[in-house]
């Protein structure tokens, strides 16, 4: 089973941020909020594209 592009993109965002903050003990709530908003935006954009493609067929 192949992962959807939106899930892959969200996992990529998570992996990048985890790598960036891995050695830190404290992470600001702003950084966590930014990551969650980036993931949410990526999923919403992908969902919108998928819906548009499905209705065009």
Image (cartoon, rainbow, N blue to C red):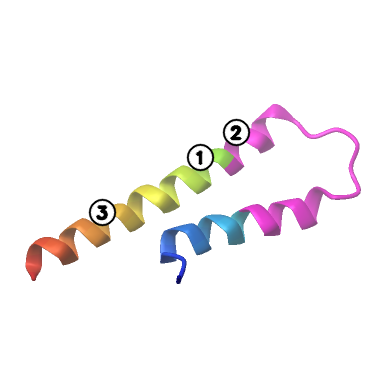
Q: Which residue is mark 2?
A: 33
Q: Residues within 10 Å of mark 3 (few under 14, many from 20)?
A: few
Mark 3 or mark 1: which is in front? Answer: 3
Relative to 49, residue 24 above or below = above
Rendered residue at 60%/61% (across/down):
12
Q: Disc 3 or disc 2, which is closer to the eye?
A: 3
What residue is disc 1 on?
Answer: 37
Q: Position of residue 54 (x, y in %)?
A: 15, 63
Residue 30 belongs to magenta span: yes
Q: Secondary structure at mark 3?
A: helix
Earlier along the polypeptide chain: callout 3 or callout 2?
2
The residue that appears at 45% across and 70% down in the rendered structure is: 1
Question: What is the quadrant of the C terminus in the image?
Answer: bottom left
Graded by Cα atoms within 10 Å as few (under 14), some (14 to 19) or many (20 or more), the crowding at tag 1 reads few
Element on which disc 1 rests: helix
Q: Tell me how far mark 1 sits from mark 2, CA to CA.
A: 6 Å
CA gap, disc 3 and disc 2: 22 Å
Residue at image location 34% in from the left, 54% down from the top:
45
Q: Which residue is mark 3?
A: 48
Q: Which residues are magenta?
A: 14-35
């Amino acid at each position: 089973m192949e992962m959807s592009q939106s899930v892959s993109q969200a996992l990529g965002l998570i992996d990048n941020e985890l790598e960036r903050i891995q050695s830190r003990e404290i992470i600001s709530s702003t950084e966590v909020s930014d990551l969650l908003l980036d993931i949410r935006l990526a999923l919403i954009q992908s969902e919108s594209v998928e819906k548009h493609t499905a209705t065009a067929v």
